[in-house]
Image (spheres, rainbow, N blue to C red):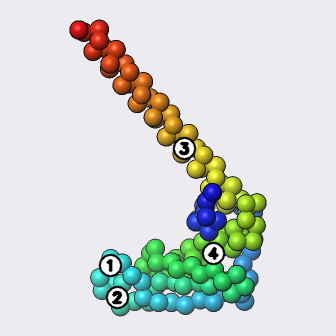
Amino acid sequence: SIPKLQAARKRNSLNLLGLNEAELEEQFVRGDGPGGQATNKTNNCVVLKHIPSGIVVKCHQTRSVEKNRKIAREILQEKVDLFYKGEESDVYKEKKASEKKKQEKKRRAKENLERKKLFKEMQQLDNK
């Protein structure tokens, strides 16, 4: 089971709930992490809160405030969609599908590794 809000941030979702700007609270704060003076002296980190659900998103992916605002809104929209739709959300379904694909890939890799080990053992027995 995937925690619902961690499934957000998938790009291909089309059927998302819209955000009303009146329901958003936006702040600009100093970001954290590497970056030195560029990070420590500029308020280009966007903190966006969806008031009805209480979901908060913090975005500091770029140095541009405008890009961070746009990215924060995309992330928030996906999280709000997940919050209200739950398992019916496209974001959740995509995350489940990608997780299933990843597990299948892991399983095949493990099988191939086992086959290679078996093949090596057979070769060593033939050489003796």
Q: Nearer the viewer, residue 125 or 8?
A: 125
The residue under label 2 is which amino acid type? Asn
- Determine the CA span between mark 4 and mark 3: 28 Å
Sequence-wise, the earlier of marks 2 and 3 is 2
3 or 1: tag closer to the N-terminus: 1
Q: CA distance from mark 1 to mark 4?
A: 25 Å
Work out whether residue 38 or residue 108 is closer to the camera in this orientation and state it.
108
Label 2 with label 1: CB-CB less than 8 Å: yes
How far apart in space, not on screen, are marks 3 and 1 (Cα)? 36 Å
Location of mark 4 (residue): 76
Q: Are marks 2 and 3 in contact (CB under 8 Å)?
A: no
> In which quadrant will I find the N terminus?
bottom right
The residue that disc 1 covers is 35
- Examine the rendering and report whether any part of residue 74 can be seen: no
Q: Secondary structure at mark 1?
A: loop
Question: Marks 4 and 2, how far apart in space?
Answer: 25 Å
